Image: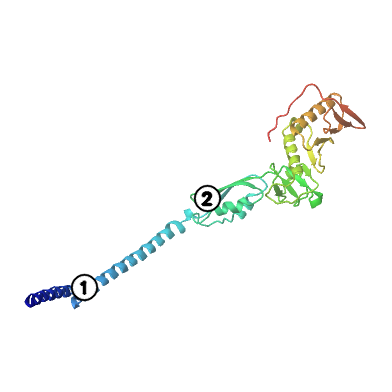
Amino acid sequence: MIQLFSSNKRRRRTSTGNYAFRSKKPVRTEIHRLDMNPETVATRRATLRKHAGAGARWAFGLLSAIVFLALMKVVVMEAFVKNRDFHIQKIDVVTKGPLSRSEIITASGLKDGDNLLMVSLRAVHDRLDVLPEVRTVTVTRQFPGTILIDVQQRTPVAWLECPDKAIAAKVPGYGCLLDDQGVVLPNTSRQAADQKLPVISVEKLPRIVPGKQVESPAALAALMLLQLYEQSPLHEQHRLTKVDATRVHALVARFDSGLSATFPANGDPVAELNRLQRTLEAASQRNWRVATVNLLVERNVPVTLQGSTATLSAPSTRRTLTASR
């Protein structure tokens, strides 16, 4: 019994010892790396030669670029900047209107001798386009040495008169003109034809800006009546000299023959001009010298003769006026 117990005890120690061996901590191993390319005198020389070659290439490239730019500058100066074919030698202006050729050239800012390639056509266009008298403008280059300016000017068709703004008509160097679109033009021209233009008189104006459309419905209505009358057959018999738009409900047209016709402010100007034409034809058949015609009345047409008053019925035969706005 004693021997058997002793043998079992030894086995138990052996198993315990195996367990103790397996439970020990792992041993840390250190790794040493060996540098296979150590820096030597030869490697330092090779690195220096490599860097020196790259610097030489950069220096050569920079020097080549400087030489190329210098040559290009010389070529550009000789071929374009100093070449007489690329200098402004002539400024052609195609225009018709109150602005003269010299005034347009001065406003454009162009000068003889300027380089054509350096001139900004957009800047020249903008400087001319702000002028009130200019409707459209085109600026082009033409070689050798020519700038072409084509200006379409606004043509004045009537004077603007407003006592409230102290604006008088037909005063030399003073006053305002209107074109066919109602754009305000300053009276800078001294043409004799402007003195013969008709006058549009209004009572009040909110503001007047040269180059902008007049802000007056009464003035625009009078301008439309004036344009339609200028296109009618009546224009050959009676010249319209003034349209009084000071009244709210009526437009009074005055003619060089002494005739005065009152039109409704909100009526159809073509239809009213037809009525005026028929009325004058009927008066001519009776050898009447008409002083005033009142077209505000829808039925019949009251007229005033020299020294008397009469009322004419509308003739049965109607004639129409064709007019384009």
Above or below: residue 88 compared with residue 23: above
Q: Nearer the viewer, residue 242 or 250?
A: 250
At horizontal 76% and vertical 30% (from top left) the residue drawn is 271
Picture disc at residue 196: none
User: Residue tagged by mark 1?
Assistant: 46
Quarter in which the N terminus is drawn: bottom left
Q: Quadrant of residue 199?
A: top right
Residue 221 visible in the picture: yes
Give the residue at mark 2.
Answer: 146
Residue 324 shown left or right of residue 314 in the figure: left
Q: How many marks?
A: 2
In the image, what residue type sits under mark 2? Thr
Label 1: element kind: helix
How are the residues colored?
Answer: rainbow
Q: In the rendered image, which quarter contains the C terminus?
A: top right
Q: Which residue is more in the foreground, 97 or 300?
A: 300
Which is closer to the viewer, label 1 or label 2?
1
